[in-house]
Image (spheres, rainbow, N blue to C red):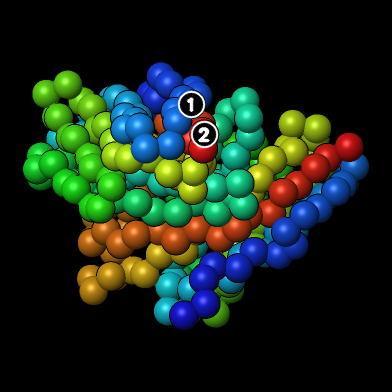
Amino acid sequence: KAGVTQTPRYLIKTRGQQVTLSCSPISGHRSVSWYQQTPGQGLQFLFEYFSETQRNKGNFPGRFSGRQFSNSRSEMNVSTLELGDSALYLCASRHPGLAGGSSYNEQFFGPGTRLTVL
Amino acid sequence: AQKVTQAQTEISVVEKEDVTLDCVYETRDTTYYLFWYKQPPSGELVFLIRRNSFDEQNEISGRYSWNFQKSTSSFNFTITASQVVDSAVYFCALSPVPSSGSARQLTFGSGTQLTVLP
């Protein structure tokens, strides 16, 4: 099975621009989560999507948004980029489990997109 | 609120030495999951282990072992006979036990950079 794929792997933007990152989960996985990793704040949860619905969102400003498509692929968007948005953005996918939600299944992470804001 | 503390920022050992990575957590939940992930320089988070809070049995997998002590809120990770390939950043993480529709976000510690010297 192919793993979680993220595109692009590297991205350079300037302040004020917007950016869209893409994540393709493992086949059959319907849950996708996004995390931001920075040297200062570490790994922080952004949001989780399941069946095209956002389940939860971390403590990030409204400039960070996401969506999930019917094929479970997910995108996250950051508008009006700031220098502090420079980070490694990691996507993780998870199989929903038999009950569609009440069991825990491992999250498998992609290689990440390294965003640099100049 | 959940919190994971990895007090050791960096550890350096010589190959074949044993090394223990510490993890202390805080949560108000009575049941929860604990995890260890490895992040090599490539950036992808690699799942190592998941432990349910009501299963305090220690676990061994090859050169890896984990010591979970609920009484001290610790979940320590030991690598026996370390190898150069073990060099990576190791993250401890905590997640609530999911119920249908609930989020499954991981709360990560700040990570421990392990360097194994030849």
**Mark 1 belongs to chain:** B
Q: Position of residue B39 (x, y in %)?
A: 51, 46
| Residue B97 visible somewhere in the drawing | no
Residue type beneath disc 2: Leu
Q: Is residue B27 above or below residue B60?
A: above
Q: Position of residue B46 (x, y in %)?
A: 45, 54
| Residue drawn where x is 15% and y is 30% of the image | B69
| Residue A82 visible somewhere in the drawing | yes
From the image, tell me which residue sits under label 1. B12
Q: Is residue B97 above or below residue A37?
A: below
Left or right of residue A82, residue B7 in this image: left
Comparing B100 with B31, the one in front is B31
| Residue drawn where x is 52% and y is 77% of the image | A2
| Residue drawn where x is 35% and y is 32% of the image | B17
Rounded to the nearest whole Å, what is the CA distance between mark 2 and mark 1?
7 Å
**Mark 2 belongs to chain:** B
Mark nearer the N terminus (2 vs 1): 1
Comparing A67 with B113, the one in front is B113
Question: What mark, if any, has residue B117 been given in the picture?
Answer: 2
Contact between labelled residues 1 and 2, with CB atoms less than 8 Å apart: yes
Q: Secondary structure at mark 2?
A: strand
Left or right of residue B29, residue A14 in this image: right
Splitting the image into 4 quarters, where does residue B47 fall?
bottom left
Q: Nearer the viewer, mark 2 or mark 1?
A: 2
Residue type beneath disc 1: Ser
Q: Position of residue A29 (x, y in %)?
A: 43, 73
Comparing A57 with A82, the one in front is A82
Splitting the image into 4 quarters, where does residue B81 fall?
top left
Q: Position of residue B118 (x, y in %)?
A: 51, 37
